[in-house]
Image (tube, rainbow, N blue to C red):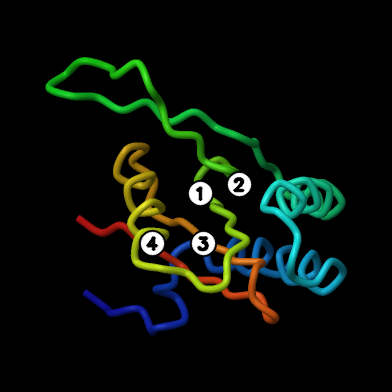
């Protein structure tokens, strides 16, 4: 069995690059200081302009011992039908923000989330990969 090099091992590399590029453009144009909803609206426009397929405010059902709970999470975006994009507009990302994105991955079975924070002077983003 041959081992792929590190470049080939990156999950959804091209798709993630396109998403982060769109987020960087939004941050470049708007800067920081707006509410999260403003960045979400701008991200939707930027993704559409770049022909990047997405769904917005995607409900994520949760189960408890086989029963679906009445309250669901809502992921900000599901991009390319496989990448969760979670937006924040806060001073700095915290462990709770990373945990939220990881919970979304666990609940959906998707493998990659991108967490993007528009609240800092420079776009702060990270890839979160759920492994078995």
Residue under circle 2?
A: 79
Q: CA distance from mark 4 to mark 3?
A: 7 Å
Question: Label 4's element?
Answer: helix
Q: Looking at the image, do the residues carrying marks 4 and 3 touch, with CB atoms under 8 Å apart?
A: yes
Callout in the foreground (4, 1): 4
Residue 25 in percent (x, y) is at 80, 69
Height in image: 78 above or below 70? below
Density class for disc 4 (Cα within 10 Å; few <14, some 14-19, many ≥20) is: some
Q: Is residue 64 left or right of residue 5?
A: left
Residue at point 44%, 64% (across, down): 11
Question: Mark 4 near mark 1, Cβ–Cβ under 8 Å?
Answer: no
Q: Disc 4 to disc 1, how far (Cα)?
A: 12 Å
Q: Quadrant of the N terminus?
A: bottom left
Instruction: Please provide percent x and percent y for residue 3.
Output: 28, 79
Q: Nearer the viewer, residue 8 or 56?
A: 56
* Of residues 97 and 66, the one drawn nearer to the viewer in this rendering: 97
The residue labelled by disc 1 is 84
Q: Which mark is residue 115?
A: 3
Alpha carbon separation for disc pair 2 and 1: 6 Å
Give 109 or 7, whichever is nearer the viewer: 109
Instruction: Give the total number of marks visible in the rendering.
Output: 4
Q: Secondary structure at mark 1?
A: strand
Q: Please determine whether, in this image, residue 42 is positioned above or below residue 62.
A: below
Identified at 51% across, 62% down, the residue is 115
Disc 2: CA contacts within 10 A as few (<14), some (14-19) or many (>=20)? many
User: Mark 4 = which residue?
Assistant: 98
Name the N-terminal-most of marks 4 and 3.
4
Residue 29, picture quadrant: bottom right
Q: Residue at x 35, y 16 (%)?
A: 70
Question: Which quarter of the picture shows residue 68?
Answer: top left
Count neighbours of disc 3 (C-alpha within 10 A) and say few if under 14, some if 14 to 19, many if 20 or more: many
């Amino acid at each position: 069995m041959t081992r792929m090099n590190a470049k080939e091992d990156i999950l959804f590399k091209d798709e993630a690059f396109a998403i982060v590029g769109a987020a960087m453009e939004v941050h470049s144009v708007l800067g920081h200081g707006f509410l999260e909803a403003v960045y979400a609206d701008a991200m939707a426009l930027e993704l559409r302009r770049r022909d990047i397929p997405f769904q917005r405010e995607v409900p994520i059902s949760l189960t408890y011992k086989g029963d679906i709970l009445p309250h669901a999470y809502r992921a900000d975006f599901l991009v390319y039908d496989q990448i969760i994009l979670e937006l924040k507009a806060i001073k700095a990302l915290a462990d709770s923000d990373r945990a939220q994105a990881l919970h979304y991955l666990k609940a959906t079975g998707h493998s990659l989330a991108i967490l993007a924070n528009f609240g800092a002077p420079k776009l702060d983003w990270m890839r979160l990969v759920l492994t078995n």
